[in-house]
């Protein structure tokens, strides 16, 4: 430690000097700083090593077909040793987008209700309950899906939709119950807490003055929410949506239990399908050939990169938005 | 008086259990400027926010008493606060243009809320209001820039233009110049005097010279009570109340 320019007189140092001379405090600060820096570095190292592990594990698959043809081949058949990721990419995208279509408006609605409309006590309760949805283990969603949601969809909702909208390829029969539709529904439940809590964070960062500006101009409650809250939260809500998407893309257990696990591309939302994460969960234990294992690892690598990029971009966006809003306060 | 556009009778206001206004009576003549002065926390903001029913938007806040606007009590059960707020405009201490909207859209926001969408009407009103707010020359070339890209003083005049666009008969201003430099302040003071021929203005200020310069009547508040209310010239020269005298001579507050 550098020597202090001030005289070290132990008898009559002023309080001020005592404070600035307290080496133990500065030492503790420094230790703390290094510990946190070390942890941050470890985390980065962990991420990189995961990426490298996946890259290494998938090298066989990359060499045998190349990434482009891997993701554009529409047959995934372990028996014939043909591995094309298109069906699982398709399954992942469709189930995730479906879940967003359902979850996004609901989550924004919940966030507006909790933050802007409900009396404080009710808002807190609803907010708490929604947040609790995030605490339920994924496998419980899966069980609920298998025993409650899927039978209900198969017996009632899907036949009804098929009879009304069956002429539209998306809603063609037969009603399997398990499939993209059930996966999308389960996923939407699972990402509502993410999207709604991030949106609440974004809405809460909007200064009170913004809202009063609208009210004072004669805006109704709804107009105020549109003008002062939604209008200036577009980027933040987009970020919240992307974080939800990141979660939906990677969610494994519940999806595996209700999607039917058939790697195929079919127009109907009611047909069984397979996602990137569910194919890995399903087949990793039983994969015997090296190419099969390696192809699964390549699916994992793609999933890793896509979810990482989606979620980190979304996070950056949300941070930027809430920080600039706070400055306006 | 028949000429009073606003008369307040026995107005009380609470934040939860805390009573911020204690039975205020006050009349405001049409086409006048009324200044509200008093030490910090005496209830000036609360008072003006009761006049457009914004006070009740604060969680836990409530008010009682009568506020007759053009003879009609705005606290009657069947009155829609939204409609009151279109008649009683408000400018806040901190400029608060909508950050997502352009200068133009900020000015016409109130018109759009009132259901006016005709482009030609919006344009005309926007120019008129910006001229009224002495801002037109400075922003006529950047109407499509974000409202928040203007300087603080310009933003405040933008907020004034936004409030004026819906042609409210009354404009409330809560310390509109306290965040501004002397030049912007002078512009807004000039504006207030100009506006008097069209509308009635009630303005909170901490600056007693400002109150003396621009207002016709002044109300002195202390601890939630209206201590004295009278012609500005006499209130500042021969105050009737001891407390008023102490305040304007700087003995407390
Ligand atoms: N949101 C609120 N919640 C609870 N109490 C409040 C709130 N706003 C104001 N008060 C209280 O009400 C009283 C009046 O406040 P008000 O803001 O009207 O004062 P003011 O005269 O405008 O003061 P200033 O000159 O500092 O703006 C104060 O005692 C204050 O503590
Ligand atoms: Mg105030």
Image: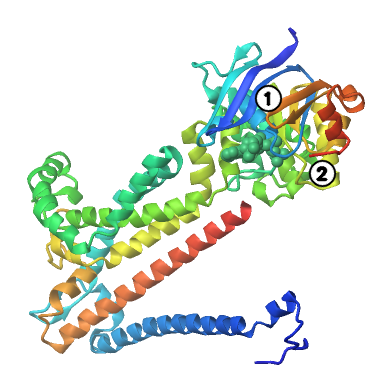
A190 and A242: which is toward the camera: A190
Total numbered labels placed on residues in the image: 2
The N terminus of chain A, quarter of image: bottom right
Asked if one can make out residue B126 in the rendered structure from this viewpoint, the answer is no
Q: Which residue is mark 2?
A: B184
Residue at the image position 14 percent from the left and 55 percent from the top: A144
Quadrant assignment for ligand 2: top right
A303 sits left or right of A146 in the view? right
For label 2, the SS is: helix
| Residue at screen point 66% across, 32% down | B90
* Label ID, residue B167: 1
Q: Report the side of B220 relative to A88 (left or right).
A: right
Of residues B175 and A219, the one nearer the viewer is: B175
In the displayed structure, A77 sits above or below A138; it is below
Measuring from the top left, give residue A278's x and y in whole percent.
19, 69
Q: Residues within 10 Å of mark 2 (few under 14, many from 20)?
A: some
Chain where mark 2 sits:
B
Q: Quadrant of residue A265?
A: bottom left
Q: Is residue A167 visible?
A: yes
Q: Residue furthest right?
A: B237
- Residue B244 image point, x, y percent: 83, 29
Badge nearest the viewer, 1 or 2: 2
Q: Residues within 10 Å of mark 1 (few under 14, many from 20)?
A: many
What label does residue A208 carry, if any?
A: none
- Looking at the rendered structure, the secondary structure element under dot 1 is loop
Q: Earlier in the sequence, mark 1 or mark 2?
A: 1
Name which residue lies at 14% across and 63% down: A257
């Amino acid at each position: 430690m550098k020597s202090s320019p001030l005289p070290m007189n132990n008898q009559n140092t002023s309080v001020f000097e005592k404070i600035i001379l307290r080496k133990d405090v500065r030492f503790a600060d420094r230790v703390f700083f290094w510990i946190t820096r070390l942890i941050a570095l470890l985390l980065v190292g962990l991420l990189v090593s995961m990426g490298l592990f996946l890259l290494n594990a998938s090298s066989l698959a990359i060499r045998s077909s190349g990434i482009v043809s891997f993701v554009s081949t529409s047959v995934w058949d372990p028996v014939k040793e043909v591995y094309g990721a298109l069906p699982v990419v398709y399954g992942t995208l469709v189930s995730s987008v479906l879940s967003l279509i359902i979850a996004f408006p609901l989550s924004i609605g919940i966030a507006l209700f909790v933050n802007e409309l409900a009396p404080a006590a009710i808002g807190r309760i609803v907010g708490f309950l929604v947040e609790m949805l995030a605490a339920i283990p994924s496998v419980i969603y899966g069980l609920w899906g298998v025993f409650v949601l899927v039978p209900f969809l198969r017996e009632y909702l899907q036949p009804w939709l098929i009879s009304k909208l069956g002429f539209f390829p998306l809603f063609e029969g037969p009603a399997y119950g398990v499939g993209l539709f059930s996966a999308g529904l389960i996923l939407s439940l699972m990402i509502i807490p993410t999207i709604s809590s991030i949106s609440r964070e974004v809405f809460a960062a909007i200064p009170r003055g913004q809202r009063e500006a609208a009210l004072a101009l004669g805006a109704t409650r709804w107009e105020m929410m549109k003008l002062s809250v939604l209008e200036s939260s577009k980027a933040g809500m987009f970020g919240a949506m992307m974080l939800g998407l990141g979660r939906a893309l990677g969610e494994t257990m519940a999806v595996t239990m209700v999607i039917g696990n058939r790697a195929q591309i079919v127009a109907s939302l009611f047909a069984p399908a397979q996602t990137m994460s569910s194919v890995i969960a399903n087949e990793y234990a039983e994969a015997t050939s090296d190419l099969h294992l390696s192809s699964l690892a390549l699916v994992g690598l793609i999933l890793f990169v896509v979810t990482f990029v989606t979620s980190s971009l979304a996070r950056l966006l949300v941070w930027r938005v809430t920080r600039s809003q706070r400055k306006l306060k | 008086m028949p000429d009073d556009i606003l008369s307040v009778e026995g107005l009380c206001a609470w934040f939860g259990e805390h009573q911020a206004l204690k039975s205020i009576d006050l009349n405001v003549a049409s086409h006048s400027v009324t200044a509200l002065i008093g030490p910090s926390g005496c209830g000036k903001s609360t008072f003006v926010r009761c006049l457009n029913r914004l006070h009740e938007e604060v969680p836990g806040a409530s008010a009682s008493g009568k506020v007759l606007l053009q003879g009609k009590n705005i606290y009657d059960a069947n009155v829609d606060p939204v409609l009151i707020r279109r008649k009683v405009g408000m400018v806040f201490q901190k400029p608060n243009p909508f950050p997502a909207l352009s200068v133009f859209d900020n000015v016409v926001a109130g018109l759009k809320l009132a259901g006016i969408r005709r482009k030609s009407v919006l344009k005309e009103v926007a120019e008129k209001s910006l001229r009224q707010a002495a801002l037109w020359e400075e922003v006529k070339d950047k109407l499509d820039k974000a409202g928040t890209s203007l300087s603080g003083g310009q933003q405040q005049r933008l907020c004034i233009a936004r409030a004026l666009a819906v042609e409210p008969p009354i404009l409330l201003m809560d310390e509109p110049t306290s965040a501004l430099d002397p030049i912007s302040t002078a512009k807004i003071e000039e504006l207030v005097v100009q506006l008097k021929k069209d509308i009635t203005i009630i303005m909170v200020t901490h600056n007693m010279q400002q109150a003396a310069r621009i207002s016709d009547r002044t109300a002195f508040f202390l601890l939630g009570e209206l201590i004295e209310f009278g012609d500005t010239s006499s209130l500042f020269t021969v105050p009737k109340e001891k407390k008023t005298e102490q305040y304007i001579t700087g003995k407390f507050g």
